[in-house]
Image (spheres, grey):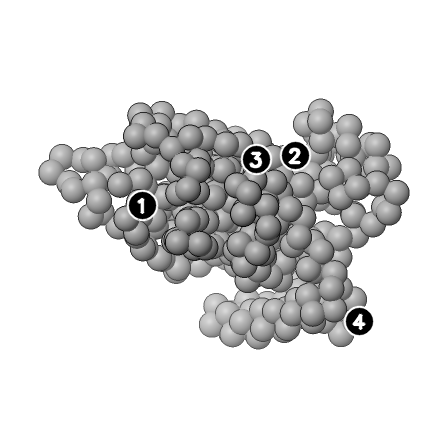
Amino acid sequence: MVDLLKQPITEKEFSDNENNLLRYGSCGMQGWRRRMEDSHITDISQGENERFNIFGVFDGHGGKEVSSFVKNHFTKAFLANKKIQTDHIKQAIIETFLKMDELMQESEGIKELKNISKKAQEEDDILSKKYNIVDTQMDLYIKALLSKDENIANSRGCTAAVCVIDNKTKKIFFANAGDSRLILCKKGRAYRMSIDHKPDLEIEKNRIHKAAGWVNDYGRINGNLNLSRCLGDLEYKKNKKISAQEQIITAYPDVIEEKMSSDNEFIIIGCDGIWDCIQDQEVCDIIIEKTKGSGVDPFKVKLSHILGDICDRICHRNVYSDGSAGYDNMTCLVVQFK
């Protein structure tokens, strides 16, 4: 059972920016959860001659440590990958996903995660005083972990949904590990460019069983996690007889390539807190309506504010069969082509 606040925290973190090719907006909202565990990247015009635009959503679980760590390192690690020099972008992305787990196991990575955790605890204490939040057993457990000489990434992780737009090869790469999601809106229609990696998917379940894991009747791996791919959660990745791709839980992403086209209108990247509560096409329709409404300049409406309205809609609407609202953290990006 997830511990929830008595009232949602609806303060939002907005950002908007643009370059010659595109503009983007992002929005993050804590909502009903006791802490904000998501992070994201919006790194435009990166690399040789401003070649790459890199966007990503990282949905943390167990804490914000791993999602924050990945935010700090993903773009730098991708741009340092030598596969880029030979235009093997898909392989560079895959290796960057796997590189995150490697960095978390290095001495500097372990130290950084610990520092992130201490800072996160300080932020939680400030938030607790502001909103009169009382510590739960999980909060006490997290504090206890800080006093142990243990790699925090053993028991915490994050999903990763990343979009890399390559100006040189004129391709868009959609990469995903976990249940965050990437959508391409083309001529007004939503196209899902990722797979939600859940343990009950046949291909995921087969890998889990081969690696000596199990899935319970509630779709949780070894009775715990309800997603089958993520960064971090290193305790599930310690079988030295098999590759990183074959572990019970793997950071290995699915990657889909798409050619740049004038038919492509925008890309949406969101954590499962968005997609559990609203359909792919509905989000596209809202963005189209807000940017192309009567008398509206489609490139002057703030994209982040559209996403903020969507988060509020999810937070306060009935979306599940039992009438409950969207209770997860919410982070969403939209990338609009000019």
Looking at the image, tell me whether mark 1 or mark 4 is earlier in sequence order: 1
Q: Which of 174 and 5 is in front in this view?
A: 174
Residues at marks 3 and 4, CA–CA distance in whole angstroms: 36 Å
Look at the image and tell me whether residue 1 can be seen.
Answer: no
Query: Dot 2 corresponds to which residue?
Result: 198
Q: Is mark 2 on a helix, strand or loop?
A: loop
> Label 4 crowding class (10 Å Cα cut-off): few <14, some 14-19, many 20+?
few
Point 65% across, 54% down: residue: 100
Which residue is the site of mark 1? 22
Q: Position of residue 152 (x, y in %)?
A: 72, 63
Mark 2 or mark 4: name the one nearer the start of the chain.
4
Say whether marks 2 and 4 touch (CB < 8 Å): no
Assign a secondary structure to mark 4: loop
For the C terminus, the image quarter is: top left
Q: Tell me which amino acid carries mark 2.
A: Lys
The answer to which of 209 and 61 lies nearer the viewer is 209
